[in-house]
Amino acid sequence: MSTIAMGHAGAEAAPAEKKGLWSWITTVDHKRIGILYGVTAFLFFLLGGLEALLIRWQLGAPDKTFLSPEAYNQLFTMHGTTMIFLGVMPLSAMFFNYFIPLLIGARDVAFPRLNAYSYWVFLFGGLVLNSSFLFNAAPDMGWFAYANLTSKQFSPGLNVDFWIIGLQILGIASLAAAVNFFVTIINLRAPGMKMMRMPMFVWMSLITQVLLLLAFPIITVALVLLMLDRSFGTHFFVPSGGGDPVLWQHLFWLFGHPEVYILILPAFGVVSEILPVFSRKPLFGYAAMVFSGCFIAFLGFGVWSHHMFSTGMGPMADTVFSLGTMLIAIPTGVKIFNWIGTVWGGSIQYKTPMYFALGFVAMFIIGGLSGVMHASPPADLQQTDSYFIVAHFHYVLFGGSIFALTAGAYYWFPKMTGRMLSESLGKVHFWLMFLGFNLTFAPMHILGLNGMPRRVYTYSAGMGFEFWNAVETAGSLILGFSFLIFIWNILKSLKSGEVATADPWHGATLEWSIPSPPQEWNFAVEPTVDGRDPLWELRRARGGTLPEPARVSGKGIHLPSPSYWPIVTAFGTALTLVGFLMHVTLWVILLGVAITMLGIFSWAFEPADH
Amino acid sequence: MAHDTAHALHPPTATGLDTRKLAIWTFIGSECLFFATLISNYLVYKGESLVGPLPHETSQCMLHGQMTTCEPIFEIPLVTFGTAVLLFSSFFVVLALNGAQQGNRKKLIGWLSATVVCGLFFIGMQVYEFYHFYHKGLGYTTNLFGSSFYTLTGFHGTHVTLGVIWLATMLVLAIRGKVPPEKSLNLEIAALYWHFVDVVWIVIFPVVYLMR
Ligand code: HEM
Ligand SMILES: [Cu+2]
């Protein structure tokens, strides 16, 4: 790796250090926005976890009256919606924000202010969705909101409307961010970083952005149609007017299945960064990893109806969608073998990130296997709407996404904060989480096959469900407790953790070549790349160790200026949509549009450099 | 317009493509799925309406509280003219861009004004059409045809309106002399969006108005 000097001689003074609340509100620095995403998403994640614990407490024993059926419906709906849209997606966005520019050797994302806008829209969307609790009108029809449960006739309250508007706002945030990251990855790679040299996390992120760009418009339209049905009296999903409730299922799952890959591909990427570093071996089968990722995304748009076998689509459709679904297992299997091949024969470093990454591989295999089981329509007709499905998607989403994102958190925490997390607490966290997770979700396979339906608020004694439900509830408490240890670990490390060097793990990628935490401009000198593992190549060339990079003054480095227009525009955007919530309040909509327009114009004409 | 990129001063990007141009292409790609979904929705419900009025057929419909026989609702000549106007506007914006690149302000302002006028005409046509259909008994919730037709063309019309606002902003800038050749890319990006809005209409027009 050679280097070239960058920056423009002289004129600009060193950027001043930025502090205080206002600096966070107006920040356009991808690293700070990443931290905002991370903290916000983690809080939402804890909220979603609390909802889950309440659900588990209710199910811990038969015939409990701890939760009313209404409260139970609200809790499982908000739990699912929160975990997917406010937990896993924005936690992935934290890593996109913080690490895509660092991994490709860029100073920031392509559009820093648009990036800030995405974050604020996301925050407002999350708040709107959760504010439904204050009106005692939290969504209560399940995260996939099947018609015609969502019709005005069967859901007269605001519950469904909060869900529609909340998701609509969140969708705008995702789309804006997807455009931004797509362009960033394509266009801002450092010299020499060809597409086939990009770190695997960047590849998987790129594919995720494509999925977001293509899948979110579909749910946007579906939500619009549903809103029109509810607020304007159209009949798109209302049979009495000729509408077809099954169309909702098609539109929802056309989005919904790609969405599950939106949730898992970033996790694949994180693990593909961690396994090589802690095995001291390059990623096995790099090209196969890239192409299997592309293939998964491509097939992901053609299998949505495997969620709809029970609607009775006929043998032809059943066969096609069943085969398509089974086909996805092939590229998925390719990935799993590549991870195993990466670790195989490596000199394994037993550090916490590696524990979580290996835990991910094991748990994800279980989830993938049950997925292939319900790819078969006759089997699925027995399993659908039972706890077996709940077991499947928790093995892929918790055992998959959450394990991998936690691995990423342990791996990159030193880079983000300049402090190491405690290894001993980390391992306690891992074992408790591993134990709690399996105690909570493995028995769901058994309960599901024994006929326990999902989404029913209680069960009678004597049906044979008591024992495993009690085990699950105990497991969920352990799982919840493991996150308290994680929080403790974070707080303790921030206060008094061991100071992190630039490269505590002997990493292979560019982020480890700069100080921890990075300075605002990331790279004082623009890196040049001529391989897939630039730091390892450099270390080899230099015969072993690399000098600790110095913190520099940053004089002469040009950075985008802070701006408050992103938050103003985001507020306008959210307000416009909220106007559609309370049975269409015209003045709110107009005010929202006015603020949005003001924001966009001021933003467009704001000089970027002062 | 300001450069919203940390790398504004480092023009060579990894691909050589301008970052903002790549962004608008990406956005357009995403918008394709948006309209594809709306068009699919229209097609799924084609012929599924329980009452009239219908696009191409005579039907029983409710008018002034009475069931009567309704004529087919579409008037193809008017929309064909509107379609032509919109198509020409795409041509005009190319000429305007050409003027901007040559530093020919007169050409730029002239053709850009023509584009905006065409856009306004199209919106006017659509408003007239909606008004007219409404009075022929096709309300927003009258039947599935009405709902899916107004939703699809309404969203397209909203896109046209945003495009007109964007181009009008560029026109004001051009009149103030703020679109010199080196900033013609700003106009090019707006023009790309405008072409996209046109292309979508090229799909909607045959699918909705011509296909029986
Ligand atoms: C080999 C890979 C996979 C296969 C073959 C597969 C197959 C399936 C099938 C057939 C269903 C529908 C079952 C039913 O409702 O009756 C399903 C449900 C589900 N899958 Fe997967 N899946 C796979 C991987 C994943 C991954 C990676 C994720 C997410 C990270 C995921 C998340 C979900 C979710 C959330 C549901 C349930 C949705 C709901 O009903 O609420 N799956 N899967
Ligand atoms: Cu699926």
Image: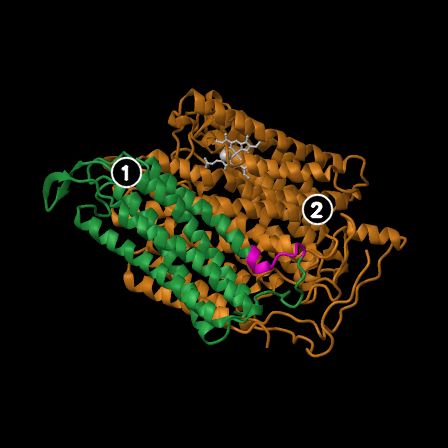
Quarter of the figure with residue B161: bottom left
In the image, the chain rendered in green is B
Quarter of the figure with residue A601: bottom left
Q: Earlier in the sequence, mark 1 or mark 2?
A: 1
**Residue found at the far right of this picture:** A543
B141 lies left or right of B83: left
Display colour for chain A = orange
* Residue A596 visible in rendering: no
Q: Is residue A207 magenta?
A: no
| Residue topped by disc 2 | A273
Chain of the residue that carries numbered disc 1 in the rendered image? A
A15 lies left or right of B182: right
Label 2 is placed on what type of residue?
Glu
Q: Mark 2, residues whose alpha carbon is within 10 Å: few (<14), some, or many (≥20)?
A: many
| Residue topped by disc 1 | A238
Label 1 is placed on what type of residue?
Val
Q: Which residues are magenta?
A: B14-22
Question: Tags 1 and 2 in contact by the CB under 8 Å rule?
Answer: no
* Of B59 and A371, the residue lying toward us: B59
* Of A63 and A515, the residue lying toward us: A515
Chain of the residue that carries numbered disc 2 in the rendered image? A
For the point 50% across and 56% down, which residue is it?
A: A176
What SS does tag 1 mark?
Answer: loop
